[in-house]
Structures are given as C-alpha cells and as structure tokens.
Amino acid sequence: MYIKNLVASEQIVYDHIQGLIRIVGYKPFHERITSQWCNEETILIDSTFIFFMGALMQIKNLACFIRSETSLSNIILAIAQKSCYDRISVCGYGILAEILSDEQLKQVQITDNISDFFFRILELAWSHPTQRYKRIPIPQLLTGFLTVSKNDAIQQKTANLNKLSLLIEMSEKYPITLDILWSLSFNEDIQQQLRSNRLFMSKLARLKEKYSNEKMRKIIFGILWNLESCHQDRPTSDFIDEKTFD
C-alpha cells in the first residue's frame, strides 16, 4: 500500500481520514463487530484500521494531525477494548501507540491490557500448528507488538510479566522479535532479565558476527549496547542516531 502515490496532497489524505473517522465512530457499527471476518461492519472497521496503520507509517505529519484535530484516539480506544475480533484490537492498540504520547497512554490506563493481550495471543499462536491466532499470522502479531513496545509503561509491564523467554524463543524463527527486544532493552528491569539469560547473550555474540544485513546488525549491536556488553567494540558515534523502525 503506497498511499502517497495514490493522493495528490496530504490535505486530501486528511479529508479522507476525517471521513473514515466519522464512519468508524458510528457506534451501531461497534455493536455489530463479530469474532469472525464475516459481516460488513467487522470487515469495514478492520480494513479501516489497517489503512490507518499504513497511513501513519507512510505520512510524516499524520500522527500530529490525528492527535490535534480529531477524536480518533477515543474512538479507537473504545473499539479496541470491546472488539471480539482480535485483529481489530491488535491494529487499534498499534494505532494508539503511534498517536499517543507515553504520558497519554498512562492516562488512559490501557498499558496493562495491551501487554497482557499481546502475550496471551502470542503464546496461543506460537503453540498452534499453523503459527496463527484466529487466522492472524505471528509476523502480523509481532508487528503490532513492535509498535507498542516503544512505550515506557508497556516496557515496564512486560518486565513485570517476566515472559521474555517467549520472545527469545520466537526470535529463532522470527527475526522481527529481535527488533522488539531492542525496544524493550531500554528498560532497566528488562536489561537485567536479558543479561541473566546466558543462552541469549551467547546467541547475540554469535549473531553479531553472522549477519551481513545492515539493519539486523544495527538491531543486534543496539541490544548489546543497551546491555553494556560491547561498548568497547564499537565507537559511541555508531549509536548516537535515534532508534527508528521501518
């Protein structure tokens, strides 16, 4: 989905966003969301949330516009907490993580719900033969968790859950999990948990020599830097750049 190629200006996008917000804000639609992708209301809201996620990643100032000019955050919060179709909740929480500050997320008091929600569905998907949760593939679930893992309160809740072993295990098959662990490793409690996992530390030492892909090398060195394991191996300037996600 290349939104910038489909519209002439950001203002047109903003106009479309306003129209979509009015649609998803129509409360009778919320009552019609089902646990399966089988009726028009569920399909409409699910597809609109996916569009919002794509637009937020592709259009630089869209988060500021949504935050200041619309009521989308309140609408999405209500839907994400109530939806019985989990992909809508995954996208909803991801959108909230993009448009709300850490302090705003704390104020709406959903960080505990988000962490519990993602780990519950990740555990179920990981143990399922299809590596899916209700038809949602693990990579899509991990992409949603990557978005919210940048939030300080969610990092702390994740540390309190003490379930990093699941993410470490999943990293063998899904490299995006290492990106999540990099985000989480900015939390001091998580740093301690990762340092105490000798197998994981040994794995990082091997991987930093294995990967030729620049993005993956940056992720691995970023984790090691946060864990103070390779400060002597790399110049500080390599890590001055702000951490960004593709």
Image: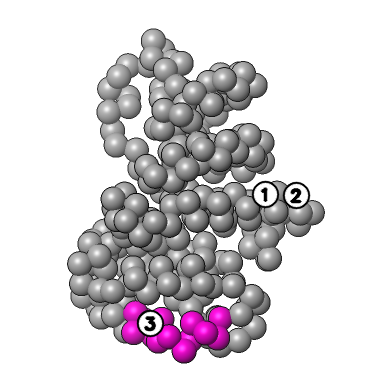
Alpha carbon separation for disc pair 1 and 3: 32 Å
Q: Which of the two discs, 3 and 2, labels the residue nearer the N terminus?
A: 3
In the rendered structure, which amino acid carries the disc numbered 2? Answer: Ser
* Residue 1 is at least partly visible in this image: no
Amino acid of disc 3: Gly
Tell me where residue 236 sits by quadrant: top left
Count all numbered tags in the image, as a single digit. 3
| In the displayed structure image, the side of residue 150 where residue 181 appears, left or right | right
For the record, the magenta segment spans: 20-33
First along the sequence among labels 1 and 3: 3
Residue 123, label in figure: 1
Q: Which residue is drawn at 63% across and 55% down?
A: 121
Q: Which one is nearer the viewer's eye here, 126 or 113? A: 113
**Image spot of residue 50 (x, y percent):** 47, 69
Location of residue 10 in the rendering, given as x and y in whole percent from the top left corner: 23, 71
From the image, tell me which residue sits under label 3.
25
